[in-house]
């Protein structure tokens, strides 16, 4: 017997996607398996690690804790869609690479999505605010110092690009 599916329309990275999903499927599994967007990672699958962080209507969520049907009619942004220019990386992505803020990389998409949400609402965060903002995102490799540095550098660059003092 196959599980019944329900039709949903989710705007993923700006593109409306019509999908048939089982009511029990998580947004994380649908993004990775049905939508083919494997940048979002499955770590714990129970809301503890933050590897699955995406933006739902611009608010960061653990996509392993959201049912795909809850995203019906809403906007989802994944790591694949955070750059303003689809042909370029987001400055956070560039700085994470340049400054060694990613090692195994498993946590990186979730942390970058969370950092984007942080900078969108607070373009000039203190170190404490960055560390607090990332409290739900676990990294086993880096010790966080370079992650915080990459976010601070990005904030300064974005302020400079906007013509404002950081
Ligand atoms: S996979 Fe969702 S919080 Fe860990
Ligand atoms: S870079 Fe490996 S878990 Fe963060």
Image (cartoon, rainbow, N blue to C red):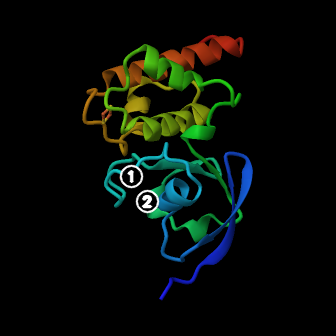
- Residue 71: % across, % down: 62, 63
Residue drawn at 60 percent across, 36 percent down: 121
Give the x, y percent position of residue 7.
67, 74
Task: Name the residue furthest bottom.
Answer: 1
Q: Name the residue under label 1.
A: 42
Confirm if mark 2 falls within 8 A of ligand 1: yes
Closer to the camera, 106 or 142? 106
Mark 1 Cβ inside 8 Å of ligand 1 = yes
Q: Nearer the viewer, residue 132 or 54?
A: 54
Q: Tell me which corner region of the image, top left, top right, bottom left or bottom right, holds residue 101.
A: top left
Picture residue at 73% right of the left edge, 50% below the top: 15
Q: Are marks 1 and 2 in contact (CB under 8 Å)?
A: yes
Pointer 2 residue: 64
Mark 2 residue element: helix
Answer yes or no: is residue 124 visible: no
In the picture, the quarter occupied by the C terminus is top right
């Amino acid at each position: 017997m196959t599980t019944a599916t329900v039709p949903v329309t989710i705007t993923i990275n700006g593109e409306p996607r019509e999908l048939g999903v089982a009511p029990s499927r998580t947004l994380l599994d649908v993004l990775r398996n049905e939508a083919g967007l494997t940048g979002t990672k499955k770590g714990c699958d129970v809301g503890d690690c933050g590897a699955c962080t995406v933006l739902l209507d611009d608010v960061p969520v653990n996509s392993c804790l959201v049912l795909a049907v809850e995203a019906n009619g809403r906007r989802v942004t994944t790591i694949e869609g955070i750059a303003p220019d689809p042909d370029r990386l987001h400055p956070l992505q560039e700085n994470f690479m340049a400054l060694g803020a990613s090692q195994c990389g498993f946590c990186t998409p979730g942390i970058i999505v969370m950092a984007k949400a942080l900078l969108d609402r607070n373009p000039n965060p203190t170190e404490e605010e960055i560390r607090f903002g990332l409290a739900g995102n676990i990294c086993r490799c880096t010790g966080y110092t370079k992650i915080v540095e990459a976010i601070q550098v990005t904030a300064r660059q974005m302020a400079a690009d906007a013509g404002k003092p950081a």
